[in-house]
Amino acid sequence: MDECIFCKIARGEMESEILYADEEVIAFRDINPQAPVHFLVVPRKHIVSALDLSPGDAGLLSRIFEVIKTVAEKEDIAASGMRILTNVGRAAEQIVLHLHFHVLGGRRMHWPPG
Ligand code: AMP
């Protein structure tokens, strides 16, 4: 997707603080952090949202969660607890229409979320 900002980050055409990258998945710091640690884990493949995943993406999804764990441990938020979330569509305020998992930690998370 030419104009998708997360595709651009994945292709190295837009700057970001990359925390992890492999052939399938990248993780980078959110530009507008909502917690002391806030990073995004994103498949390189352009998938609009969690609702657009197909059975063929099972391996990719599992890889994403492995990367979440790896980076969370590196960022030292895994042991204390953290939040993993993905927004879908307008009501959830999904701004970037490329599947991404927010990972937030380093402070107490509240429930229900806003
Ligand atoms: P969402 O509302 O779930 O679509 O969240 C999109 C997230 O992407 C927001 O938290 C933004 O701060 C973040 N974001 C947007 N552009 C960039 C960028 N260039 N680098 C890092 N994070 C970004």
Image: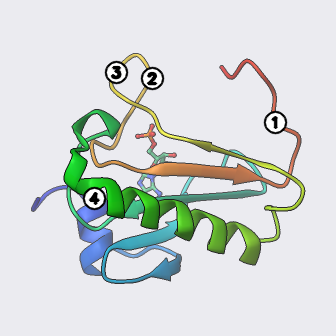
Residue identified by numbered label 4: 5
**Mark 2 vs 4, N-terminal side:** 4
Distance CA(mark 2)–CA(mark 4): 19 Å
Q: How many numbered badges does the structure rendering display?
A: 4
Task: Compare residues 59 and 2 and report the one nearer the observer.
Answer: 59
* Mark 3: amino acid: Arg
Outermost residue, left side: 2
Residue 49 located left or right of residue 65: left
Count neighbours of disc 4 (C-alpha within 10 A) and say few if under 14, some if 14 to 19, many if 20 or more.
some
Distance CA(mark 1)–CA(mark 3): 23 Å
Image quarter in which the C terminus is found = top right
Count neighbours of disc 3 (C-alpha within 10 A) and say few if under 14, some if 14 to 19, many if 20 or more.
few
Distance CA(mark 3)–CA(mark 4): 18 Å
* Mark 4: amino acid: Ile
Image quarter in which the N terminus is found = bottom left
- State which quadrant residue 29 falls in: bottom right
**Mark 2 vs 1, N-terminal side:** 2
Residue identified by numbered label 3: 90
Residue 41 located left or right of residue 74: left
Residue identified by numbered label 2: 92
